[in-house]
Image (cartoon, coloured by chain):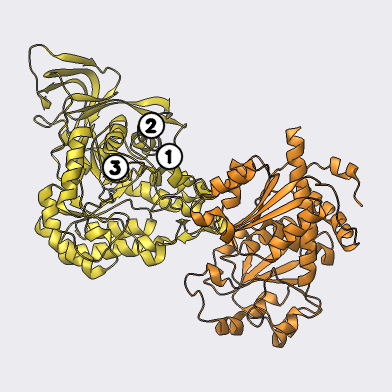
Amino acid sequence: MNGISKKFSKNLIVRGARVIDPQNGVDEVSDVYVSDGVFVDKFSGPAEEVDARGLVLAPGFIDAHVHLREPGQTRKETVKTGTMAAAAGGFTSVVAMPNTSPAMDNAASVKLLKEIVSSDAAVRVYPTGCITVGREGKALAPIGSLKNAGVIAITDDGSCVQNNELMKRALEYANMFSLLVMDHCQDASLTSKGQIREGEYSLLTGLKGWPNAGEDIIVARDVILSKYTGARIHLQHISSALSLEIIKGAKKRGVKVSAEATPHHLALSDRCAVGYDTNYKMNPPLGSEEDRQALIKAVKDGTIDIIATDHAPHSITDKDKEFDYAAFGITGLETAFAVCNEVLVEGGHITLNRLIELMTSAPAKLLGLKSGALSEGYAADFVLLDPQKSFVFDKTYSRSSNTPWLGKTLKGKVEATYVGGARAYPF
Amino acid sequence: MISKEFLKNVKWTRKDLTNLQSLSIDELEEIFSLAELFKESVVGGEGKLDYLHGKTIVNLFLEPSTRTRTAFEMAAHRLGAHVITIASSASSIVKGETLRDTAKNIEALTTDMIIVRHSAAGAADYLAERLSIPVINAGDGAHAHPTQGLLDTFTLRERFGKDLSGKKITILGDVLFSRVARSDIHVLKKYGAEITVSGPATLVPPSIAKTFGVRVTYDLREAVREADAVILLRIQHERQDMAYFPSIAEYANIFGLNEMREDWLKKDAIIMHPGPINREVELDSFLADSARSVILRQVTNGVAVRMAVINLCMAAKNKASI
């Protein structure tokens, strides 16, 4: 699957970079050898050489939460443009959410996606399947068939399963196949009309509030169901301080729960929405400053397992509207490293090595991928970074440009991305 | 009669009025001075003025309204402008046209100003950013209703004098969904009034106190005891997708102001309401029609205040384009 068809030279040596490989405990200046698309210890003979002095070489980033929109919503994004954006952002693997048209609730749709991926993708794409048919929360999707068709996890992302009995069965059933369940935690009865976080700024703007309780209740439910069934569950884009406390407590008691944080929830808070700029409208909405600080703390203490972007492209028509009617979500693949580098590393909260871990070996482990490290025999997916370099984010490869960072100066540049030893970026 | 000289000397530079938060006291004073002069002309029977002769104003009302729409029409008409009103049921919005396209088309029809009412918060700001002609907010969702805030303040200043510092104003009812409450609070606080808000906790969340710098109480008697003015808000059925309180009868029992509760009020306290009144719910007929009520005065003042706002924004646009 995920065939990357680009040509690569048989042998490649990347010279002189600071090599950071958290899984193998490596942080040193050295040369990296690639042969036939995989990392090798050394070889002799002719090779293409890349001078990477002054740069950081890290495993390629892995994003467990991306909306590629294909099939069906190609005015927003395609596999081609979405994976180009991924490559430009240093990502060599992305997990595609199943809320396409048609949704990934049957093996044939997954097969279609895989065909598009094999011809169009610039990086590796791992499909996910739906938990329920049509993401309607009513009947279980054919989870076993989806697994056989190649999905890496199941989720009804964006349409959290509301019925607790159904969610319990989904966990029990998926666990039989050791298939990861991912949940977008929100209680629809509390959040379905919400536009921004309920609090000071929903009061000031008059926009309908989305209360933290809407997330907290489902996080608690999922923790309880995971403990009860013994099944793993991954909680997507956590945004509330109390949810983080619940997750932390659950982990302490050995519940098999994991959690992700997005760059935008780490960098921005609900205050951003005061001007009704729909590039600050996302789901879950930006939290309060207190939530944001709690999220940073949770990254530091390990409550948060991975960084994931929730890259959610939307066309101008979907976004250039009254705030109430605009679509939720922003793009994130191309800015994720820089934004996290600024907030977490430059902000003095974690080391660069830890950030790289959160974007490479940690998601690889969560998803069960033989990836996210520079180990011998692993596919040569890697990225060359300049963490000190500032740049203006003025060009996006995504089909959409719904991001508040467009035109802004960011620090931490992705210089090149290699997938299976072949250069995927610059294009 | 207002001299054209007066109008030339105004310092107002905004082409749009979308909220009151951003206005300075100087800007507010300019609106109120002009509104006073316009009120004299309105009440004095001066009839139609000609300041905006040859101008066309479109009232884009995408949410039902009688009072505000008519008051804007009246204000524009009295300034000599031609007015076209577009109501949502007659507009292309029901055919799926976006707000942006509707407004851009109205602008392209050589309209000189848009007055917009919309159910979505931020809709007026959205248009103000995208159109070069002036945009006046006639109410956007639960965000702002600036001209109502202005006419309420104008009415209070008529009664209590221009300095409202230390005056106790109580806003009662559906504050959470009320753009009137928000605009009233923003402007009245600029004039030093002390604001109390009250109503069911589901519609008056306690955090309103900190966010808006007001006092919150859920005891009606306590809320109105020291008030110099009580502003009642209509219970907005159309914005409530769920029951925020058990029933209309329960609301009237706990938070309704009526004849039997009149002795809770100070002797000279006045009663205000942005309309339309739900009689016998938030306010009974006895009080609504009593000498305390300045509700119809508010309506008349609304014409004068809107004449001032229309005139200032149009003048700012014309100045900018010279």
Instruction: Using the numbered discs, state the Cα–Cα distance from disc 3 to disc 2 in whole angstroms.
Output: 15 Å
Q: In the image, what residue occupies the spot 37% across and 33% down?
A: A338
Residue at the limit of the structure toward the bottom, as seen here: B260
Instruction: Using the numbered discs, state the Cα–Cα distance from disc 3 to disc 1 in whole angstroms.
Output: 16 Å
Quadrant in which residue B209 is drawn = bottom right
Chain under disc 3:
A
Q: Position of residue B7 (x, y in %)?
A: 85, 44
Question: Taking A9 as reference, is A412 left or right?
Answer: right
* Rendered-image quadrant of the N terminus of chain A: top left
Query: Looking at the picture, which amino acid does disc 3 mark?
Result: Leu
Q: Mark 1 — residue?
A: A403
Callout 1: few (<14), some (14-19), or many (20+) C-alpha neighbours within 10 Å? many
Chain appearing in orange on the rendered image? B
A212 above or below B136?
A: below
Chain appearing in yellow on the rendered image? A
Q: Mark 2 — residue?
A: A396
Q: Nearest the camera: B9 or B313?
A: B313
Query: Looking at the picture, which amino acid does disc 2 mark?
Result: Thr
A117 above or below B63?
A: above
- Is label 1 in a helix, a strand or a loop? loop
Q: Mark 3 — residue?
A: A68
Q: Earlier in the sequence, mark 1 or mark 2?
A: 2
State yes or no: discs 3 and 1 in contact (Cβ < 8 Å).
no
Q: Select label 3 or label 1 by which is in front.
A: 3
